Amino acid sequence: MLADSDPVDLVLKNARLIATCDDDERELDGQWMAVTAGRISGFGPSGTEPDASRTIDASESLITPGLINTHHHIYQNLTRAYGPALEGNLFHWLTTLYPKWARLDEESVHLSTWVGLAELALGGCTTTTDHLYVHPAGAGDLIAAEIGAAKELGFRFHPTRGSMSLSQKDGGLPPDSVVQDHDTILAESERLVGAHHDATFGAMVRIALAPCSPFSVTPELMRATAELAERLDVRLHTHIAEDLDEDDYCLEHFGQRPLEYFEHVGWATDRSWVAHCVQPNAAEIAKLGEWGTGVAHCPSSNMILGAGMAPVAELRRAGVPVGLGCDGSASADSASMWTEARNALLLGRLRSGMADRTPTAMRARDALDMATRGGARCLGRDGEIGQLSVGACADIAVWPLDGMAFAGALSDPIEAWARCGPAAPSHTLIDGQLIVDGGQLVADGSEDILRQHRRAAEAMQAD
Ligand SMILES: [Zn+2]
């Protein structure tokens, strides 16, 4: 804790409530919070604030940890709401878009990442993963291009080296133009970890390895990637059990359900976190809990694709770390972690109400916990991000709960945050730095970037 006389970098004062999401789930009323050198450095009662270089008056606001996005494909904001892909299921959507995505290059990845991260920061997100699994021949170093955009904006970033190795000629879903051979994928994965992965506390960039899905990579690549992740001590990510078509595909091609296959290829570990997991059965839920494998719940994407209602309450009861992901941007189309928290609340209540006429299996505090602590656990960073406690990274969102949308919401700021709205942060801090200040992006140049992004999107969507 601070000594009384220690000056600090920044103080947040007068908040209606600070939802710490710490081990004791403390909710602080009438307290200030201080930030020093990128870390949370202290709390204290209102009226005893330390001297600070900057003071933010958070009156009428809820302060939460910055939200954590555990599943995204940022490049897809170049093909959002793309009409020809929208009138079918997941496989139709993918096969329509693969040829467009084959046009990706370093410039379009840089632009889409800059826009995607700015959009996430404006929605209170402070750490995001990105699952970039399209690496067309000659496209350049796409992971380095997106890390460059994250550094320009000061975003805490977990790019995953995605991969596809099973093309249509071998029984997979993607065309030849977007798949790579095993040796290239594994060599590139190892090179990127060596070049960018930072394992230290407070790291701004960490790399994970992420073969795309059972229907776009070979079992051999799944196995080899798990072994490489073990050797390099980095995390593993993939899509699994997203919809019933995937169940059919896995039974037909592997004679196994998706999570049986997942275990068979060596991924049943707490090193892994998986996107969607909409269709696990009861035995598989228990196994996920035993393995400690995390789940990125993507409620908006699951609803848009009609994939189903993930058994989130059951997964959490089984001890599975569950975070939230906005997915997309072309499947969920929006990229707001507040929206995902709200949709997780609504979908969880719908599912539980349909099961036993009692919708209370999901509350706003569950949604907030998944958006913060749950995300940190999925990324192997519990204790570091996703909570407001002394020594943790100063990744913070300040949510004004005033104006028309919150009028009358007096009794419970956390339920108000998720149930009313739309909510948007007045301030988003990452590593103690203001990324959003007064509801505006601090970084210059967004109009110019948006113009360039439009040109890149037009080129990608052209016939
Ligand atoms: Zn996805």
Image (tube, grey):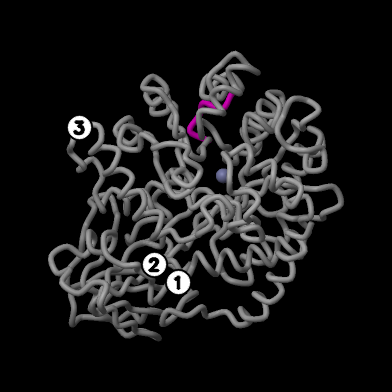
Residue situated in front as seen by the camera: 121 or 92? 92
Find residue 199 and report its horizontal and vertical position in percent.
57, 50
Element at badge 2? strand
Q: What's the residue at 62%, 81% (across, down)?
A: 447
Q: Label 3 near label 2: C-beta < 8 Å?
A: no
Q: Earlier in the sequence, mark 2 or mark 1?
A: 2
Of marks 2 and 1, the one in the foreground: 2
Q: Label 1 near label 2: C-beta < 8 Å?
A: no
Of marks 1 and 3, the one in the foreground: 3
- Toward which corner of the image does residue 93 lie, by quadrant? top right
Where, quadrant-wise, is the C terminus in this rendering?
bottom right
Q: What's the residue at 30%, 49% (across, down)?
A: 346
User: Which region shows up in magenta?
Assistant: 266-271
Q: Residues within 10 Å of mark 1 (few under 14, many from 20)?
A: many
Query: Residue 432 has which mark?
Result: 1
Q: Residues within 10 Å of mark 3 (few under 14, many from 20)?
A: few
Query: Residue 396 has which mark?
Result: 2
Q: Residues within 10 Å of mark 2 (few under 14, many from 20)?
A: many
Give amino acid for label 1: Gly
Q: What's the residue at 63%, 63% (across, down)?
A: 113
Q: Tell me, yes or no, whether the highlighted magenta stretch contains residue 220.
A: no
Viewed as shown, does residue 432 lie left or right of 198?
A: left
Residue situated in front as seen by the camera: 111 or 14? 111
Element at badge 1? loop
Q: Is mark 3 within 8 Å of ligand 1?
A: no
State whether residue 94 is above or below residue 259: below
